Image: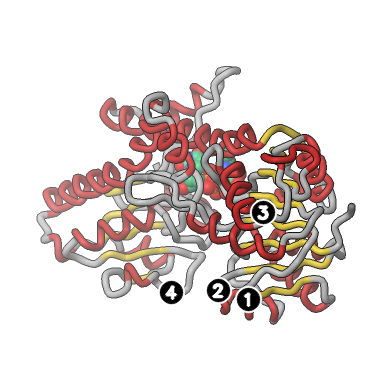
Amino acid sequence: MSFSTISVIGLGYIGLPTVAAFASHRKRVIGVDINQNTVDTINRGEIHIVEPDLDKVVKAAVSDGYLQACTVPVEADAYLIAVPTPFKEQHEPDMAYVEAAARSIAPVLTPGALVILESTSPVGTTEQMAEWLADMRPDLTFPQQAGEQAQVNIAYCPERVLPGQVMVELINNDRVIGGMTPVCSARASELYKIFLKGECIETNARTAEMCKLTENSFRDVNIAFANELSLICADQGIDVWELIRLANRHPRVNILKPGPGVGGHCIAVDPWFIVAQNPEQARLIRTAREVNDHKPHWVMNQVKATVADCLAESGRRADDVRIACFGLAFKPDIDDLRESPAMEIAQLIADWHRGETLVVEPNVHHLPKKLEGKCTLASLESALQSADVLVMLVDHKAFKTVSGDAVSQRYIVDTKGVWR
Ligand code: SAJ
């Protein structure tokens, strides 16, 4: 059976690009979100998130009549769940949004429906979701009961797109498809092939769930290695950037870049899902998280030491010293400040420093609430001209165009090796 109506539950950074991709292939798509503002914005043909090219595709999809948003699920041939999976106090995964989304589609499920979970989830979540659905719909059969003969097919298919390149990666990246049965996998592949140029690689649900967690943990562990090297090199008086450049000339070495810490909503979160389920075994994965989470505090200590040097050498009072932070975003050339180690460091500096703290962030026009009244948003030029201590936090293109030779300050903490 082909898919004439597709419903996506959760219209955030993954769900909205996904509805846009289906709608641009002339499929009727119903986007569902519990936030009425989000729904209204999309129905006006506008978007509530920043992602290159997404606005155009959504606008066309709405005006051509292929995309419609609402707050309550309606009947469809396929349902994709793309809701957040944050963690709770002790780094335990919080599956409340997935459960709510599953329970919201249960009443409208019909025989022949396909349900796909895309949210990053602990191993076993797809099976759990199938139980929630079966509980609510004893009149239908599900793969855990009827295998290949089930009336409702269920699969896990993780998103793997990079924020800032979502519209390209969504179409081109290969997809891992973890069906609860081979038939479930085959139907899920058929659905994604509506817009996918990459390959669909079929496996089972548990392996697909673990695959997503593995990808982000792999990156976290590798960044932690680079961050740990940066601490060791600072103690040894070695330039970590030169060291990494040299080590990477070895044909089998490829070290990532150190930085102020690891931000974003995925790499700093997902490894904890493995740790929560496997506390005894996941020692390296846990330590990597701890190394990366510690980095902003280490940077803050470097700032304190650098300001102390500045005060001792110049004989000035702390009130008269101006610190400039370069970058707030969680990575280069985006405007996303959430879960950003650069934000954390700017905040720590502003709370500690008695003099003025400037912030340069070319991708935003206003200071975020957390920094209002504590910092001044400054241009690159004025900060370079007037600050005594420079703290490089994000290697935005705009900062890299300034050569180290053009920077006259002696007091620099450079977490990205831009002005070393
Ligand atoms: N970072 C470093 N050094 C590096 C690379 C990154 O410090 O060498 C930092 C960044 O500055 C940032 C953080 O790591 O703070 C994460 O950035 P990222 O670009 O590595 O990844 P995200 O969080 O934007 O997206 C990741 C991607 N996962 C992988 O590359 C394995 C993406 O493909 C996933 O879809 C996404 O997580 C997700 O949604 O899970």
Dot 4 corresponds to which residue? 366
Q: In which quarter of the image is the C terminus?
A: top left
Dot 3 corresponds to which residue? 138
Front one among 41 and 219: 41
Dot 2 corresponds to which residue? 35
Dot 1 corresponds to which residue? 39
* Residue at the spot 60% in from the left edge and 18% down from the top edge: 251
Is residue 176 something one can see in this rendering? no
Q: Of the residues shown, which amino acid type is indicated by label 3?
A: Pro
Q: Of the residues shown, which amino acid type is indicated by label 4?
A: His
Residue 102 placement (x, y as % from top left)? 60, 57
Front one among 86 and 238: 86
Label 2: how many Cα within 10 Å (few below 14, some 14–19, many 20+): few
Return the mark for residue 241. none
Marks 2/3: CA–CA distance = 30 Å
Label 1: how many Cα within 10 Å (few below 14, some 14–19, many 20+): many
Residue 336 placement (x, y as % from top left)? 50, 61
Q: Is mark 1 on a helix, strand or loop?
A: helix
- First reached walking from the N terminus: tag 2 or tag 3: 2
Q: Is mark 4 on a helix, strand or loop?
A: loop
User: Can you name the residue that lies furthest to the right here?
Assistant: 1
Front one among 407 and 186: 186
- First reached walking from the N terminus: tag 4 or tag 3: 3
User: Can you name the residue that lies furthest to the top here?
Assistant: 251
Q: In this view, does 146 lie above or below 45?
A: above
Q: Is residue 172 above or below residue 18?
A: above
Q: Where on the picture, by quarter, is residue 237?
A: top left
User: Can you name the residue that lies furthest to the front here?
Assistant: 139
